[in-house]
Image (cartoon, rainbow, N blue to C red):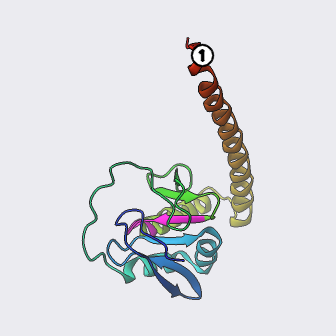
Amino acid sequence: MIRTCPVCRIGLVDQKFDGVSFAECPQCAGIWILEEELKRLESVGVDELKRLDGMERPMSVPPPAASSVFACPSCGQAMEQFHFLYNTPIMLHRCQPCGGLWIEDGEMAQMATMIEQGDSVGTNLGVDRAKADEIMARFTQEHEETMARYQSVANVCRALCCWVRPYGFWW
């Protein structure tokens, strides 16, 4: 199956780095990677994120995206946009059905920097890494559950709007 870059609309090239598989756009150097592959790469060390990000340079600067909604390179569905680590300015795109992430050129190095800063803050506050990981895992699970509830409510609201509008009941 040919995957297409959501920015440049050209075919992605399959790559391997330290045993981790991903696909890369030869034009904008954006990366399509499955979440579990990214976690595996992060577990080796944040320096690996910087090394991977520095390997390829974009051939040309991609045109600015007309919207923040990108189509999944694998299935074509709209990907959701989210903040990396919930409170950083780094915006990533995720396809829920495929479990993949779209990471634009330069964002991996930014992610590594944010992880390093987070580690140093935890150390300075006297929180050990295992406890911090446990807290973050619990927070992540709660956040995912909240987002799933939000999505369910949004789907119900959309369904009601479609049902109500044809009959002229619009308040």
Q: Is residue 71 magenta?
A: no
Circle count: 1
| Horizontal and vertical percent position of residue 11 | 41, 75
| Horizontal and vertical percent position of residue 154 | 63, 34
Task: Specify whether 16 is left or right of 129.
Answer: left
Query: Residue at left 30%, top 75%?
Result: 58
| Horizontal and vertical percent position of residue 60 | 24, 72
User: Of the residues shown, which amino acid type is indicated by label 1?
Assistant: Tyr
Would you name the residue on which mark 1 appears? 167
Residues packed near mark 1 inside 10 Å, few (<14), some (14 to 19) or many (20 plus): few
Which quadrant does the N terminus fall into?
Answer: bottom right
Q: Decide which of 129, 70 is in the foreground and name it.
A: 70
Q: Is residue 106 above or below residue 94?
A: below
Q: Secondary structure at mark 1?
A: helix
Q: Is residue 105 magenta?
A: yes
Q: Is residue 97 above or below residue 86?
A: below
Quadrant of residue 77 within the rendered picture = bottom right
Q: Decide which of 13, 115 is in the foreground and name it.
A: 13
For the record, the magenta segment spans 100-108
Q: Is residue 144 above or below residue 129?
A: above
Q: Is residue 149 above or below residue 114?
A: above
| Horizontal and vertical percent position of residue 111 | 48, 65
Quick one: which residue is furthest to the front in this view? Answer: 166
Which quadrant does the C terminus fall into?
Answer: top right
Quadrant of residue 40 within the rendered picture = bottom right
Task: Specify whether 44 is left or right of 52.
Answer: right
Query: Residue at left 37%, top 48%?
Result: 67
Q: Decide which of 46, 79 is in the foreground and name it.
A: 79
Query: Residue at left 57%, top 20%?
Result: 166
